[in-house]
Amino acid sequence: MSWKTTLGLVVVAALLGGYYYWYEVKGGEQRKAAEEAAQRIFQLKKDAIEAVTISRGQEVIKLAKDANEGWMLTEPVRAKAEQRTVDEVLDGLVEGKRDKVIAEQAADVADFGLKDPAMVVQAAVKDTSTPIILNIGARTPTMGGYYAREGEQSKVLMVPSSLYSKFDKTVFNLRDKTVLALDQTQVKRVEVHQGDQLIAVESEGDKGWKIATPLEAKADKTKVNDLISTINGAKVKEFLEEAPQDLAKYGLNPPRWRLTFFIGDDRAEKTLLLGDEDTAKSGLNAKRGALDNVFLVETKLLEKLPKEVSDWRDRALMAVKRDDMERVEIRDGDSRLEVACVENCGKIPDDRWQLKQPLEARADAVKVRTLLRNLEELKAKSFVSEAATDLNPYGLDHPAAQVHIWLKEKSEPVTILLGREDADKGGRYLKLAERPAVYVIDAKDSADLLKTAPELRDLKLLTFKARDIRKIEVAQPDATVVLEGDGDTWNQAQPTKAKVEGHKVRSLLWKLEDLEFKDEWPATAVTPDVHGLEQPAATVTLWAQGGRKLETLKLGKKLEGKDWVYAQIESSPMLYAVDAKILGDLPKGTGDI
């Protein structure tokens, strides 16, 4: 094939490709758009529509676009319109399509219910003197749509039911039902009046809220924000009266509640008045301070209102973080407990804790972290006195218990004083040493603070991680089993070489890692013939990587009357009692694991 022929074929292919793209692809898109446009009833842009009238018999609803307020209802009431619903009406006018033409020249439009149409939608369009009109008549026999016509034209169309639905709106549908529009970031102060009581909170920006009246205290930011969010999202349930002459019948003169929100730096006010409950309508009478109309809102709004100042107080007693706690001392009567972080403080889960009093021993880090969380999250159940001068009635002049918390980079501890229990209040009196206020905390919270050494002590007998073990030797009177491996791969080295199931070895290691002692004694407290550890029932030795021996555990005789056996570890002079079931978990020979 010559180059001229090849070039000719390339040119032809290019022309065919161009034809396909411009005619079939681009042209197809344009033809489809033109066909869809031809199906539309009206050819207009949404932003050109300036007013809409929807008529159904004697009912007339008028909407008009205001340059400042947006879309407004103008008849039968003047009020702000709900933009989302207005958009649905406008979309019907702009995007509404006919399903088909029923008659090009109908002899009598009355046959289609169009002489006195069920609905007339009329729109005023910018720069156009004549409004566009869509008359919608009877429903088609198949119930699949409605008969319609433009203005006074004799052409009868069939339009889908979905288009009818876009126009079938009531005044309530079209009216903006926002109770009070609030931008939470702009609310600077909230005042809640109930009768003669005033509760006021002031914004502290990112720090949250503070109570300003009737006392000064930190406010619960979640509850304040929840009220603002609830009001902002609240919708009118029913409009009751546009220009009431007697507000007293709604419980609004005077109102039961007056909520005032101060907005922005200029403290512009937005007020919501709440009156009586209407049990028949399951609602609450309400009114905006600046407007006349009375409406109904959901009664659950009352759940967000503070009935007394304590409802909005921040109940957290201390602004401390558990990651900053390095030492805790608990004094309860004559007992004293002290626990301190000794390694990786604040770095969960690698932090290590040690009991210092009443004995020197490992502390269970998980249990200590629970105590620290309980301290961090300690909350007041009730507020007793802001400045108690006599602490005797609360048992705080000579507190029965104290908790001292040392924080990172702080020389002086935070001190909690615990007084007497009060059954009537369901808790115990508490005071922070640096504050004059007295609180009540829940009885359970008190119990969660006053831990004892046995409750915080790490009772695990062996200190290793299963993942670190590379060799296990289990010596028993009749056989010795040696296992070597790592992770999922383990082999038996003694008494014979064999491959073993890795998950069974991991299970054994986890049981040894979690083995807890039930009791302990000095080594001299029990005679060898009783504990049997000179000729043990089993000896378990564990090695880490590189042949480093970690620990040796001996298991002896059973304790009389208990399912425990005596135990001893190489690193401790003490004797321990552990669950006898551990003997049954140890391999006796080949095939046991």
Image (cartoon, grey):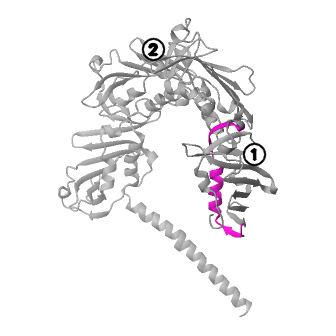
Q: CA distance from mark 1 to mark 2?
A: 70 Å
Quick one: 224 or 236, which is closer to the camera?
224
Relative image position of residue 530 (x, y in whole percent): 65, 43
Q: Is residue 346 visible?
A: no
Highlighted range, magenta: 495-523
Question: Under tag 2, what secondary structure?
Answer: strand
Seen at 57% across and 76% down, the residue is 19
Relative image position of residue 274 (x, y in whole percent): 36, 22
Q: The N terminus is located in which quarter?
A: bottom right
- Give the residue type that dot 1 points to: Glu
Q: Is residue 290 above or below residue 18?
A: above
- Which disc, if any, is residue 266? none
Question: Under tag 1, what secondary structure?
Answer: loop
Quick one: 226 or 412, which is closer to the camera?
412
- Which disc, if any, is residue 198? 2
Residue 106's quadrant in the figure?
bottom left
- Give the residue type that dot 2 points to: Leu
348 vs 103, left or right, is: right
Relative image position of residue 591 (x, y in whole percent): 63, 67
368 vs 392, left or right, is: right
- Residue placed under numbered mark 1 in the picture: 570
Quick one: 95 or 529, which is closer to the camera?
529
Seen at 38% across and 58% down, the residue is 40
Q: Tell me how many marks there are.
A: 2
Q: Is residue 208 visible?
A: yes
* 1 or 2: tag closer to the N-terminus: 2
